[in-house]
Image (cartoon, grey):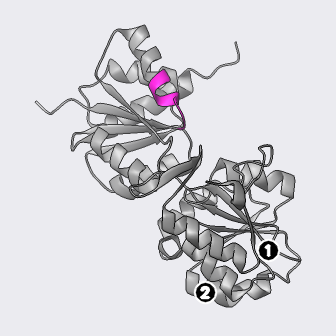
Amino acid sequence: MNEAVRGVVVCHGRLAAALIEAAEGITGVKGALAPVSNTDCDRGTLETRILEAVNGRPTVVFVDLASGSCLVATLARLRGRPDVKVVTGVNLPMLVDFVFNLEQTPDEAAERAVSAAFRAIKVP
Amino acid sequence: MPIALCRIDDRLIHGQVVLGWGRPLGIERIVLVNDEVAASPWEQELYRMAVPAEIELRFASIAAATSAVVAWGTEAARTMLLTGDIATMVALHAADGKALREVNLGGIHHRPGRRQRLPYLYLSDNERADLAILEARGAHVSAQDLPTAPAVPLRDIP
């Protein structure tokens, strides 16, 4: 069986840790997501933090913005890697869905996460 | 007109730059001077995504910028000159000190050898000395991450 996919959440400030705390609180699934913050570091240090969090495993990297330092640092080191997929615009619904579907390839998990995120955007 | 903002920010183009400064200053053009980005089409594409269509975005190597900076300082477009490090700004100031009268330290973050001077500003002793040289050559250097924050003149940066 293939190794389960993991999620790394890369955000400004404390957002990644807060999203993961909320996702774990809702689902009870712990250890599937790892936070990375861009606080107090230059790009080189941020790249190192992201690489350490991915740690060579099949991963979906969830980034907050579709531009900016978090995305640039992520793509600078992981772009083109077949075992890593990057998704921007991270939100809580996509993380909640993701942790219940870890037996997927990063490609499949990324597609599913985007779909879950869109489905959760409504004007009730 | 003189360049509207000369900013050193190691995160290059991001929200503080485009929105925080770009909107209140009415920036019409951003010139990013960085050898690595100037040679990297995919990074340029990423940075373009962060900039509204009404703002022109140019990428220049340090060598190209030192030749062009005099012209940028005379053109009508309200221009932000952006570098990722102090050495690049020093080189540009040497090319045209008139256009680069004010130098804004917007975000220089932690790396080994630097120590924290302000929440968003980490400098090695050599970098601090380079800034003093820049000011001695006629530039006014201050730290200010956003226009709504107080500017901290170089003399008050420990």
Camera-side residue: B89 or A61? Answer: B89
> On screen, B41 above or below B107?
below
**Of marks 1 and 2, which one's residue comes earlier in the chain?**
2
Furthest residue in direction bottom, as rendered: B67
Residue A113: image x %, image y %? 43, 30
Residue holding disc 1: B101
> On screen, B14 above or below A119?
below
Residue drawn at 45 percent across, 25 percent down: A17
Residue holding disc 2: B64
For label 1, the crowd category at 10 Å Cα-Cα, with few meaning under 14, some 14 to 19 and many 20 or more, is: some
Residue range highlighted in magenta: A12-18
Q: Do labels 1 and 2 touch, CB within 8 Å?
A: no
Residue B38: image x %, image y %? 53, 75
| SS category of the residue bearing label 1 | loop
Q: Which-is-in-front pick, marks 1 and 2?
A: 1
Camera-side residue: B78 or A104? Answer: B78
Residue B128 lies within the magenta run: no
Residue drawn at 26 percent across, 50 percent down: A82
| SS category of the residue bearing label 2 | helix
